[in-house]
Amino acid sequence: MVVSPSSAIADLPDLLIRQARICHPDDRLAVGDVLVQGGVITAVESHIDRDRLGDGGREIDGTGLTLLPGAIDPQVHFREPGLEYKEDLQTASYACAQGGITSFLEMPNTKPLTVTQGDMTAKLALAASKCVVNYGFFIGATSECLPDLLTTTPTCGIKIFMGSMKGPLLVDEEPVLDRLFAMGQTPDSGPGRLIAVHAENQERIQERRKEFAGISDPAIHSVIQDNQAALEATQLALKLSKKYHRRLHILHMSTAEEAELMRRDKPAWVTCEVTPQHLLLNTDAYAKIGTLAQMNPPLRSPHDNEVLWQALLDGVIDFIATDHAPHTLEEKAKPYPESPSGMPGVETSLPLMLTQAIAGRCTVQQVVRWMSANVAKFFGIPRKGAIAPGFDGDLVLVDLDTYRPVSRDRLLSKCGWSPFEGWELTGWPVVTIVGGQVVYENGRVNGQVRGRPLSFEP
Ligand code: DOR
């Protein structure tokens, strides 16, 4: 099959990936060859002749490895502009390349905040100059309900922090939230621009902060910002989404109660995500890693882990995000509650989930659906999330036979730590390819590669 899609780049050398076990869109795992030309997949066949590879083209031996569509991480905090001492777009995108993440969607809590078209344009320019993987950005809602929320392009959607945020990005009053959900919606309009919510009830958190003041054991974090705080905010977002038929996405769903609510009552225009840490870590982690386990929404109980897993397996939860939110070790060493919330994730998410697949908890194909295909589908990202002719050449070759521990020495994120340090994982990327260019190979990032801005279809 010959394909010449509009996104092809004429002068990129061809790539031919040979004899990898390919994860096909119909869920088959079968050994074959993949040809990428001009950055776009042009053939997926059991054997592709070498003479179809253009001049200067390169063959990659995939024997013994598994080829997946590159992962798309739909929730990250990459700290640039303004907080580069924690992370920047270059280090973060290198970490993505090492983790098999070929595209990311980044959050607006940078300095300046991303709340206008001007902020978005500036962030896109920074990304174009620094990112070795593809990028998209959320626009942040403030109580000013700026018209830019609906007009800024390109954007994957509007982010609302209903709780766990300071400053203008905190929008915790129902009348303001109501206005935001109503913006641009008419009785017969479609679901409109996506609103993604960080759902925690700020009022409840503030009351409980006073109630539990003076306790410096970080485990109190999960008690203060409890399941009820998350459930109440998710219920409110769901109510407003139904009132205005507004496209809603629940970020990092963390509780059994929210998962059960979604199982009972999830309109077609609502999606939700879970993080690997809310599936695999729980409140026991505080005793082992202290404030490195502190994040928002907090880690929950083993029961919450189980219910979230089941909701993911049953399709109630649609996909996986890392909420990569790096802070320095010095910041994390502060006593609770001065210690900041957040943990890195882009380098470990794919191996973590593939390790679960090899252990029999899910399948490799499900991991691909949760970390690539469904993200592309629900954010309307064209030509991503599958290995098929016409799709972009965003690919990752992983090794599902070797186990290696998560180790600080190998991490590329500027923060230099992981809550999963010491975990023995398989499924580590061997080669990561972005738009037909090898961006990561055997432990090295090619810093010359540049990702491209993502586009989003309604
Ligand atoms: O723990 C968190 N930290 N959760 C968030 O949603 C924000 C993040 C950050 O930016 O540090």
Image: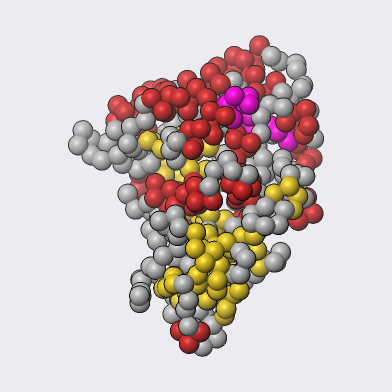
Farthest residue to the top: give it: 211
Name the quadrant containing residue 208. top right
- Name the residue: 77% across, 41% down: 329
Query: From what the image shows, is residue 10 above or below residue 223?
Result: below
Question: Which quadrant would the N terminus be assigned to in this image?
Answer: bottom left
Name the quadrant containing residue 149. top left
Q: Is residue 47 magenta?
A: no
Provide the residue span drawn in magenta: 292-305
- Name the residue: 46% across, 72% down: 46
In this figure, what is the number of numbered marks?
0
Left or right, 439 with respect to 390, comes to: right
- Name the residue: 61% across, 74% down: 61
Q: Is residue 296 magenta?
A: yes
Report whether residue 249 is seen. Answer: no
Report whether residue 288 is seen. Answer: yes
Query: From what the image shows, is residue 375 above or below residue 9?
Result: above
Left or right, 166 with respect to 260, comes to: right
Q: Position of residue 203 (x, y in %)?
A: 53, 18
Give 64 or 80, whichever is nearer the viewer: 64
Name the quadrant containing residue 389. bottom left
Give 274 or 115, whichever is nearer the viewer: 274
Q: Position of residue 392 (x, y in %)?
A: 44, 65
Left or right, 370 with respect to 328, comes to: left
Farthest residue to the left: give it: 188
